[in-house]
Image: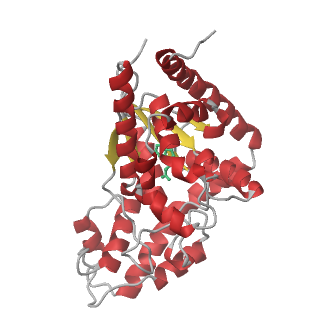
Amino acid sequence: MENSRKKLYSAVQPTNNLTIGNYIGAISQWVKLQDEYDCVFAIANMHAITVRQEPANLRKRTLELLALYIACGIDPKKCILYLQSHVPCHAELAWVLNTFTYVGEMERMTQFKDKSAKHADNINMGLMDYPVLMAADILLYQSDVVPVGLDQRQHLEITRDIATRFNNIYSPTFTVPEGLFLKVGAKIGDLSDPSKKMSKSAENVNGSVFMTDDRDTIIRKFKRAVTDSGNEVKYDPQNKPGVSNLISIYMAFTGKTVEEAEADFAGCGYGDFKLAVGETVADKLAPVQAESERLLADKGYLEGVLKEGAERAFGIARKTLSKVYRKIGFYQL
Ligand code: TRP
């Protein structure tokens, strides 16, 4: 009864608030992809603890992220939406895959090096093992495609390497996944420094617009956004990175093309342009925020979604894990 649709997997960590960069680059894309693929979306709380988390906060953010996913249009009827720690197979497969991954490979990962520098007082084993857990996530669901940002490209490469290595030793076991590196809005820049990616954890909070920011905050942040010399609203990432970043955000929130966006602001000064982009974003986020609040007030519903998601995810994951255990020689009852 397998159907012919390709399988897609992705996840987001429940750390910090999501920014409009995460929304444009990930969640809004997933909403479109769920009609084309069999989708599994996770809340990666096991990845989150590789950096110290405040427990109450982690718990709270988990439900907030779930509510936001659904409010943005991810439909738990169309896809599997679950919390990583609810499916023990992730930890189990990660352990097995650890024995097919070399320490040297992990030490060379760019993100590990960056995070080690940032959290020098807590370079724990989990931080180094992060890519193996991510490989386990993806491979458990026999995923064909994995939409991620460019910062995750190396993690996807190592996932493919581990899968291929295992398949070559034991005969085909895992689907070797392809990365889907989204172009549209894949790199929304920080409003105060467009050369940097808009981040959930940026030091300067004015550069990141969060999904939960209220209207006044959103507009204030856009008003403060850096622009460039000249006075024309033109899309030219090389020479006008600030203005181009704002145009990209505008395009993502309106679905307009570069030409249409430029036409909307022909003869418009930078001040009015920034205000208009801020208003567009605030208008678009208002209903999402309202829906997310409504869902958060209905904990029973959210827990029901998690319960059903975990059961469905477990069904798939357990099958892959049994196959792996059989191939490697674990005695099974
Ligand atoms: N590491 C990803 C990120 O921070 C989150 C993640 C965890 C993920 N497991 C995954 C993404 C599996 C894709 C597939 O963005």
Can residue 37 be seen?
Answer: no
Write down the quadrant of residue 308 in the picture.
top right
Q: 148 or 122, which is in the foreground?
A: 122
Q: Assign the C terminus to one quadrant of the image.
A: top right
Q: Is residue 73 left or right of residue 102?
A: right
* Residue 28 placement (x, y as % from top left): 45, 51
Which colouring convention does the figure follow? secondary structure
User: Going 35% across and 18% down the picture, which residue do you hit?
Assistant: 171
Q: Assign the N terminus to one quadrant of the image.
A: top left
Q: Is residue 158 left or right of residue 278?
A: left
Q: 109 or 148, which is in the foreground?
A: 109
Q: Is residue 128 left or right of residue 233?
A: right
* Residue 212 placement (x, y as % from top left): 61, 64
Can residue 121 be seen?
Answer: yes
- The mark tally for this picture is 0
Please identify the residue farthest to the top as the structure is shown: 333
Write down the quadrant of residue 15 in the picture.
bottom right
User: Going 38% across and 80% down the picture, which residue do you hit?
Assistant: 273
The correct choice, above or below, for 291 with respect to 141 in the image is below
Q: 188 or 67, which is in the foreground?
A: 188
The correct choice, above or below, for 33 with respect to 6 in the image is below
* Residue 168 placement (x, y as % from top left): 32, 25
* Residue 319 placement (x, y as % from top left): 53, 19
Q: 101 or 226, which is in the foreground?
A: 101
Q: Is residue 208 left or right of residue 84?
A: left
Write down the quadrant of residue 31 in the picture.
top left
